[in-house]
Image (cartoon, grey):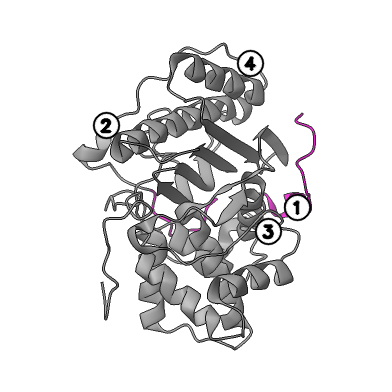
Amino acid sequence: MTIDHPAHSRTDSASDDRIDPGRRRFLSGLSLLLGSALGLGSRASTAYDWDEPPPLQKWPQGVVPRGSLQPYWMRQAPDTPRTPFSADLNTTIQRHLDAMRRSGRLASNERTAWLVYDFTSNRYLVTINAGAPYQSASMIKPFIALAFFTKVQEGKLPYTPYQRARMEAMIQRSDNQATNYFIELLNRTSARSGPAEAEHTLKNRHPGIFRHTRIVERIPGGGRSYRNRASALDYHRFLHALWYDRLPYSREIKRLMGLPNRDRVYTGAGGVARQTWVLDKTGTTARLCGDMGILVAQGRDGRRYPYTFIGIIEKARPASNYGAWKNARGDVIREVSNLTYAHLRQMHNLV
């Protein structure tokens, strides 16, 4: 990294974003996400303004998809157990979760939240506990980035090459020191604390998006961030507005979320086609395993079909074996991602 790169400590919340160099490479021109090649310009909706989801019912030229994965990361999630398939994805995933609870792969002291939204049909396909606040862990970091970029847009803070490097450290490598650096910058813009100013900025500028979000702490030593919270619906509304360039510095945030890292929706999820592109942010502590992002699938007609995917697993007490628990719950999210892609493959004739 460049000048004064924050040390990347081996913490709970930082361990979720190891870099896979061949995974994703995004170049320039992210503002063209809604170009005519996508044919989505007329599909923008006000979904991100809704307090609760309704009842269930091309990328730009120059973008390079992820290449082959490194051998270490080629480990596939366990085969998705045979789950009774339903034409309704919400039902399919609920049955899968019930089966995992019966088998002990989800414990009685763990709760989950899931949301899938299809941009092509403008429909929620999955909403399971979507409006309930959960711990955020590192998934709060794109929200911190948005609060910072709002201040940049207002002329209260600069965005220098040095800050760009630290922003990449925060989003790509989930660096906690870099996160606290930006929280401290927000602190300097008002009499509020840094976390309070981040939350105030988000809710003041985007009240329809961050309805269940609470930002109350910096990332503590050791990365055990348990107090910041948001709902799956908040993540979706953020991603929806981001996709349609309705946020300050949307292009830059999309670039940051598309940098190479290890995720739980594509990496190791063998059921998701390798032609799929991803913008995401994972979150991990000894009590939280999650991922939130936009996947852009390729259809056999050559078009791109984007959708949001949010999966969260929260444990009531810290796992006794953090590494094993994190890996096992990450595989649960990968299995649900596989089920989601299989459903969308049928909907849109994906590759």
Task: Return the disc, 1 or 4, that comes first in the chain's sequence.
Answer: 1
Q: For marks 2 and 4, give the CA distance.
A: 28 Å
Q: Residues within 10 Å of mark 4 (few under 14, many from 20)?
A: few
Q: Residues within 10 Å of mark 1 (few under 14, many from 20)?
A: few
Between disc 1 and disc 3, the foreground one is 3
Span shown in magenta: 40-65
- Indicate the quadrant containing the N terminus: top left, top right, bottom left or bottom right: bottom left
Residue 86 bears which disc, if any?
Answer: 4
Q: For marks 2 and 1, give the CA distance.
A: 40 Å
* Residue type at numbered disc 4: Ser
Q: Name the residue under label 2.
A: 75
Q: Is mark 2 on a helix, strand or loop?
A: loop
Residue placed most toward the observer, 113 or 11: 11
Q: What secondary structure is the magenta-colored segment mainly?
A: loop
Question: Residue placed at 27% from the left, 63% from the top?
Answer: 8
Q: Mark 1 points at which residue?
A: 42
Looking at the picture, how far across and down is residue 129, in whole percent?
66, 36
Task: Return the disc, 2 or 4, that comes first in the chain's sequence.
Answer: 2
Task: Return the disc, 2 or 1, that comes first in the chain's sequence.
Answer: 1
Between disc 2 and disc 1, the foreground one is 2
Task: Return the disc, 1 or 3, that comes first in the chain's sequence.
Answer: 1
Looking at the picture, how far across and down is residue 111, in whole percent?
55, 33
Q: Quadrant of residue 310?
A: top right
Asked if residue 310 lies left or right of residue 221, the reply is right
Query: Is residue 62 highlighted in magenta?
Result: yes
* Residue type at numbered disc 3: Phe
